[in-house]
């Protein structure tokens, strides 16, 4: 929430408006006074990004629910000349704000009648404009893909699960985790996906009668060969008859029926605390800027809106329509129409379909063999994707194979069957447990001849020919796989063994794969960058006037530097996609020099590793050190491969799990469609695809159709959506950058002067 507060304040000041803090929520508005309604400055929101909670406070207010309370609140707002209100909260807070807006003219008339305000002033402030942003760790608001705080709460949950798993290495136990979610099971459902839980209980999907026996039977089966069972229970979980299912009930059931050593962990309010994740900082910053734009563009007849996330776009939706939809979910649950409640939630249906794959009984064996290999550098979340592919593939009846060390392993015949239990516990593992190398499919090691094919007495005519004869599909992850897949597709003309369905999943910290907005591993790398930047800035807490120059990875793609800079509150981010020269560097130095004259005396500059071959990190460090001599000193850090390591974030675990499950379903469909006369023969464009995220949809795209969208020399897409976020970072860093608002609500860079000052006042 602090990132949203920071964005609203700085964007409001940027467009020339006065911005006010209202402390302690509606209570501060009702009480009034200089301490509760206070003008904000640019410096007053410095160093807020890494702080959890909300620095301006939040409190429940019974008085605001009464007419008299709202009348007092209106009086205090008009005293400050405030007619634009930005509310960050849940559906109750937003509903209250809309009611306040609808009553506004009547409240002012009442104040005039009581002699507490003049008629002229009443006419001047005749309309109240409001815009909402949803802050809720439960992600229970319809109309947005994600609410502010949800991703950070998932981080807290997964940190606990990972810690519990280390305990399980020495103690064979069953753990029952109770997570928040009185009316919404999002945290429980998604954390179950992220950690590979054995059972999950949520309010919207009560288990069928007899669930107790089914759960115990599953736990009994899974306990063979594993030292850990995890059951996740949402605090509002119920059965089909509305009876609560608590963590203690689940524990007693497991102990009674199975005799397992069982422990209960109730996470409680730890889920609300801690440092916000990179995703939440970026989400809140984008929403805050969009909220200010919405307030400035609204009119007296414009309905109240809420800023929402749709895929990777910030959009404005009618507030009360979203509130009514959210209330419809609860109504459906009260009437025990649980399937309808799930559909109204939207995202649940997709997530639950993935969850249901993993406890499913293994069907009869199919005739298809499916192989999985990783290509290129490792990225956090690859193991979760492999685990999902293996288990969904087995559930579909396929025989699954794992290829070690990418194409080199495929060439050498390092192919072995991989079974259900072999991928247990893989979701939380970083790197690539299969091994991954960057060798392309045409690579052939020296002094190494390909081994004979198991299905053909003739020597294969292609280095990987013998391996593909043993499988009916090849599934590949990582960015270099894009070029590899194109080579395999072209080789179909001369090697029929490559006429099999092939699917690529994007997995790279650089997020530079064409055809997808997001890649597995990028979120984990962003969190590593942001966490390091937080620590680096904190190291200067006792040192005045210091600028940090930090080099990030990414090849020629500036995603990590740009988006990481937005999340960490950087003053500048140098990338290859946006050329810069010595004049830009000098301008940045002058900007930081001016900044050091205020109370903000720390600077942060990020540089993508390949942003410029001459303006290296050392050069920029030396330039800043020399030009800032006597004003500030500099330190430099090269983050290096720490960005590739560590446990994957909840986002990457879930993204890898879901995208891989969808890919395996596609593979099953293609294998069935192309199976003729005892063999698989797939040679069409749509049988060699990349599965990518486009806005909010997972889309299969033939790799040959993506060639024109790709800069193969620099391994980046020709168009990258995140470049539209760069003006936002500059605005929040107080640069003289202007903007236009595109049709999608994104900020686009325009080289102009700053906009003229506005007479608007914005409160939050």
Image (cartoon, rainbow, N blue to C red):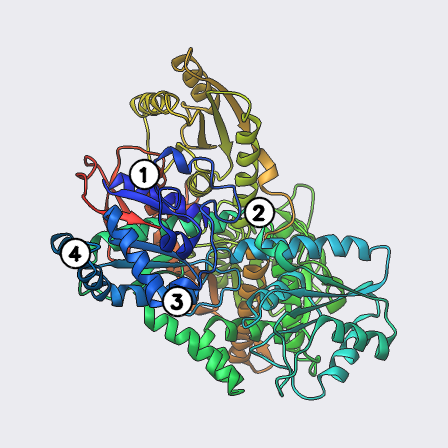
Q: Earlier in the sequence, mark 3 or mark 1?
A: 3
Tell me the residue that label 4 is attached to.
122
Q: CA distance from mark 4 to mark 2?
A: 66 Å
Label 1 sits on residue:
731
Viewer-nearest residue: 612 or 105: 105
Check contact, mark 1 vs mark 4: CB within 8 A.
no
Between discs 2 and 3, the one toward the N terminus: 3
Q: Which residue is mark 3?
A: 65
Distance from the alpha carbon under mark 1 to that under mark 4: 34 Å
Quadrant of residue 14 within the rendered picture: top left
Would you say 337 lies left or right of 78 here?
right
Residue that appears at 39% across and 75% down: 325
Q: Nearer the viewer, mark 2 or mark 3?
A: 3
State the mark number for residue 458: none
In space, the residues marked 4 and 3 are separated at their CA atoms by: 23 Å
Sequence-first disc among 1 and 4: 4
Q: Residues within 10 Å of mark 2 (few under 14, many from 20)?
A: many
In the displayed image of the protein, which residue is found farthest to the left?
120
Q: Secondary structure at mark 3?
A: helix
Q: Name the residue at 48% across, 64% down.
A: 688
* Mark 1 vs mark 4: in front: 4
First-in-chain label (4 vs 3): 3
Residue 472 in picture, x, y percent from top left: 60, 70
Task: Judge by depth and name the residue closer to the eye, 261 or 468.
Answer: 261
The part of the image, by quadrant, that contains residue 187 is bottom right
Spatial separation of the CA atoms under disc 3 and disc 1: 37 Å
Q: Nearer the viewer, mark 4 or mark 2?
A: 4
């Amino acid at each position: 929430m602090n990132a949203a507060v920071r964005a609203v304040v700085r964007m409001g000041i940027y467009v020339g408006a006065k911005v006010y803090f209202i402390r302690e929520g509606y209570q501060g508005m009702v009480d009034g006074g200089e301490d509760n309604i206070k003008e904000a400055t640019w410096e007053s929101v410095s160093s807020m990004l890494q702080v959890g909670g909300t620095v301006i406070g939040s409190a429940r207010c019974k008085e605001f629910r009464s007419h008299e309370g709202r009348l007092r609140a209106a009086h205090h707002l008009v005293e400050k000349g405030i007619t634009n209100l930005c509310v960050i909260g849940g559906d109750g807070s937003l509903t209250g704000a809309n009611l306040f807006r609808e009553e506004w003219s009547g409240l002012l008339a009442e104040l005039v009648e009581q002699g507490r305000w003049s008629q002229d002033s009443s006419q001047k402030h005749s309309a109240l404009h409001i815009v909402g942003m949803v802050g809720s760790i439960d992600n229970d608001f319809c109309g947005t893909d994600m609410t502010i705080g949800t991703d950070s709460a998932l981080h807290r949950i997964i940190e606990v699960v990972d810690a519990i798993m280390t305990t399980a290495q020495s103690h064979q136990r069953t753990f029952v985790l109770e997570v928040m979610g009185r009316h919404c099971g999002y945290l429980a459902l998604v954390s179950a996906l992220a950690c590979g839980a054995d059972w999950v209980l949520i309010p919207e999907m009560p288990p069928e009668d007899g669930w107790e026996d089914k759960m115990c039977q599953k736990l009994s089966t899974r306990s063979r060969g594993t030292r850990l069972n995890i059951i996740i229970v949402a605090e509002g979980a119920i059965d089909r008859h509305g009876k609560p299912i608590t963590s203690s009930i689940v524990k007693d059931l497991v102990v009674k029926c199975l005799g397992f050593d069982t422990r209960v962990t109730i996470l409680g309010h730890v889920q609300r605390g801690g440092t916000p994740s990179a995703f939440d900082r970026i989400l809140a910053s984008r929403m805050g800027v969009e909220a200010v734009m919405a307030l400035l563009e609204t009119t007296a007849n414009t309905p109240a809106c809420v800023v929402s996330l749709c895929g990777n776009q910030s959009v404005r939706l009618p507030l009360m329509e979203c509130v009514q939809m959210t209330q419809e979910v609860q109504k459906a649950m009260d009437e025990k129409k649980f399937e309808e409640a799930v559909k109204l939630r939207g995202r649940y249906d997709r997530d639950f379909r993935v969850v249901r794959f993993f406890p499913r009984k293994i069907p009869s064996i199919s005739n298809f063999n499916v192989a999985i290999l990783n290509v290129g550098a490792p990225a956090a979340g690859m193991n979760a994707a492999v685990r999902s592919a293996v288990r969904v593939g087995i559930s579909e009846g396929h025989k699954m194979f794992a290829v070690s060390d990418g194409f080199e392993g495929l060439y050498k015949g390092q192919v072995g069957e991989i079974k259900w239990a072999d991928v247990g516990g893989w979701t939380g593992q970083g790197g690539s447990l299969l091994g991954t190398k960057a060798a392309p499919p045409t690579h052939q090691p020296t002094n190494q001849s390909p081994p004979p094919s198991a299905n053909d007495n003739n020597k294969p005519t292609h280095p990987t020919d013998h391996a593909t004869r043993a499988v009916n599909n090849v599934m590949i992850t990582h960015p270099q796989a894009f070029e590899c897949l194109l080579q395999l597709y072209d080789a179909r003309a001369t090697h029929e063994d490559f006429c099999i369905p092939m699917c690529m999943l994007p997995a790279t910290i650089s997020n530079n794969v064409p055809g997808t907005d997001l890649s597995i591993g990028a979120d984990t790398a962003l969190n590593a960058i942001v966490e390091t930047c937080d620590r680096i800035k904190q190291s200067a807490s006792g040192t005045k006037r210091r600028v940090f120059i930090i080099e990030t990875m990414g090849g020629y793609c500036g995603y990590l530097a740009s988006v990481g800079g937005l999340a960490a509150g950087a003053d500048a981010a140098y990338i290859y996609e946006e050329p810069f020269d010595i004049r830009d560097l000098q301008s940045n130095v002058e900007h930081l020099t001016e900044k050091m004259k205020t109370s903000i005396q720390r600077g942060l500059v990020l540089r993508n590793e390949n942003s410029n071959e001459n303006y290296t990190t050392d050069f920029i460090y030396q330039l800043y050190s020399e030009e800032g001599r006597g004003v500030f000193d500099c330190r430099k850090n090269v983050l290096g491969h720490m960005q590739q390591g560590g446990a994957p974030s909840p986002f990457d675990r879930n993204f890898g799990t879901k995208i891989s499950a969808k890919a395996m379903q596609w593979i099953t469909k293609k294998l069935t469609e192309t199976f003729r006369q005892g063999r698989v023969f797939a040679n069409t464009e749509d049988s060699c695809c990349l599965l990518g995220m486009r806005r909010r949809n997972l889309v299969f795209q033939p790799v040959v159709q993506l060639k024109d969208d790709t800069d193969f020399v620099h391994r980046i897409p020709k168009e990258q959506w995140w470049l539209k976020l760069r003006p936002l970072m500059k605005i929040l860093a107080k640069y003289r950058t202007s903007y236009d608002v595109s049709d999608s609500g994104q900020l686009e860079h325009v080289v102009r002067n700053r906009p003229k000052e506005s007479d608007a006042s914005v409160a939050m």
